[in-house]
Image (cartoon, rainbow, N blue to C red):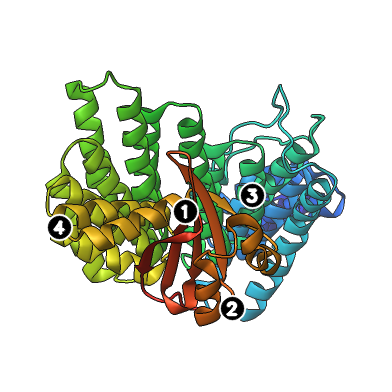
Amino acid sequence: MRRNTFGRVGAGVLAVLALGLVQTQPSSATICFTSGKVYVQQKVYDKAAYFLECARKAEPENVDALSLLAFARAQQRQFLSAGAAFQMALDIARKKNDTKKIADLERNRLAVNAQLFNAGVKALSGSKTTEAPTESALPPYKPAPAPQEAVTDTTVFPPFTGASRLEEAGYDFILASYVDPSSVETYQNLAYVMGGLGRTDDAIRAASKGLEVKPDDPRLKTNLRAAVMGRAVGLYNDGKYPEAIEAFRDAKKKDPDPASQPGYQVRIAASYYEIGKAATKDSPEQAAAYDSAAAGYAGVLDEAAASDSLKQNALYNACVIKANQGKTKEAIVLLDKGNGLYPKNKDMWSLNGQLKNTALDFKGAVTALKHAMELDPQDPADHQALFLALNKTGDLQNSVAEYSIYKALEGTKKSNLQIWVDAVDNRYGPQNSLKKVKADEGYPEDVYTYTEENKRFETWFFWSKGKSYTFMEGQSFSKGAFPPKKS
């Protein structure tokens, strides 16, 4: 009876105990988390990651499980999943406004990231920035996918084994970017290294990814500009001008800095010009290329971010191209506009005067060339053009003076002026006309000599007074006047 009673009672107790076990049994998430934590303590990271991944799936918002999972993945050099786990944990902690967990997670992530980042800096410091290995051991850079996708990526990234220290730096910075995709400094260095390796597309990707984190970062903007410009410039330097045009256009789209846009416009115009130079002379292809080049240069005027210097150079180039195409009137229209915008641009005044001579607008040429001389009276080409214009307008006396100045400036400039001037009697005899000019004006600031039709000519320039005196065989020949040169 006792045995039976005992059996019945025992059965009842066992049933109650079994029920109790069912009621208090830990969840699978708890078992996974506890097991994972124990394996982390034992430094058995592959098993730790297995159980912590189990815990993550069972409890997606378990910050502690994600934090330990990130650590275990990092110890196995599974940096994509490590970075994703860190990021997911941080997102949850921020959503819960758990400042302590946020600080702990950021500190833990920084510790892992710093090992990789510092290794990259060390490799970079021991490299040559123009190092370009013949065989690359560095795979293409691909930004990490979204955390929910990357957290299951168990790719193992072994230590770098290539010979290039610069590639080693790039490799370490790539891994650092996987661990902490919010580190702007990592992208700065990665873009710089990739640019140094000539890996233009990788440099663009790195800089662009960094600008997603911090859109106004000046160093990343510089990195991106160098990368997109580098590819296009490389094509340009290789003579691949059609490809360069497309690359410069692509650079305009990818470069977020408005200040750099005019530079791309100028490069596109220059590429069209080179295409025109290489085309068959006077062919439709050449005409089309030159038209595109001129339009491109002229279009810089509409670029708000273009500097005045860039606008002036571009406008001048557009006018030269049009002039060389025989489109003189179109060039003059542009130059008149440019002279109004930039009245102190001597080159545009000079070109305007020369083209107005070509267009038979001699009075307009005189006006433009005199403006040019107000800015610089020492350009022989301006005096030659003014000589032609004055001759056509019937001003023969001033025309001769301008011709003499032009010929003199193309001649031989004398040194040791005082000795040269004081020796005029030795050159021309005591009846020369030069002594009176010396008595009236003093010593000249420049002296030039030239020979024409077996006659010796000598011109004395008094730039600050706006005067010149030309002598033929020691006797007065012509007197020139021009705007006094500003000191």
Q: Residue at x 23, y 38 (%)?
A: 292
Q: Viewed as shown, does residue 76 lie left or right of 279?
A: right
Q: Are marks 1 and 3 in contact (CB under 8 Å)?
A: no
Query: Which callout, 2 or 3, points at the residue further toward the start of the chain?
Result: 2
Q: CA distance from mark 2 to mark 4?
A: 92 Å
State how far apart marks 3 and 4 are (Cα). Answer: 65 Å
Q: Amino acid at mark 1?
A: Ala
User: Where's residue 343, x and y in %?
Assistant: 29, 71
Q: Are marks 3 and 4 in contact (CB under 8 Å)?
A: no
Q: Does the rendering let one see residue 93? A: yes
Q: Amino acid at mark 2?
A: Asp
Sequence order check, earlier mark of 1 and 3: 3
Residue position for label 4: 394
Distance from label 1 to label 3 (Cα)? 54 Å
Residue tagged 2: 98
User: Which numbered disc, 1 or 4, marks the residue that appears first in the sequence?
Assistant: 4
The residue that mark 3 highlights is 192
Q: Which residue is mark 1?
A: 408
Q: Where in the figure is residue 417, as x and y percent of width and height?
A: 65, 66
> In the image, what residue occupies the spot 70% across and 45% down?
49
> Residue flagged by tag 4: what amino acid is it?
Gly
Residue positioned 50% across, 74% down in the render: 437
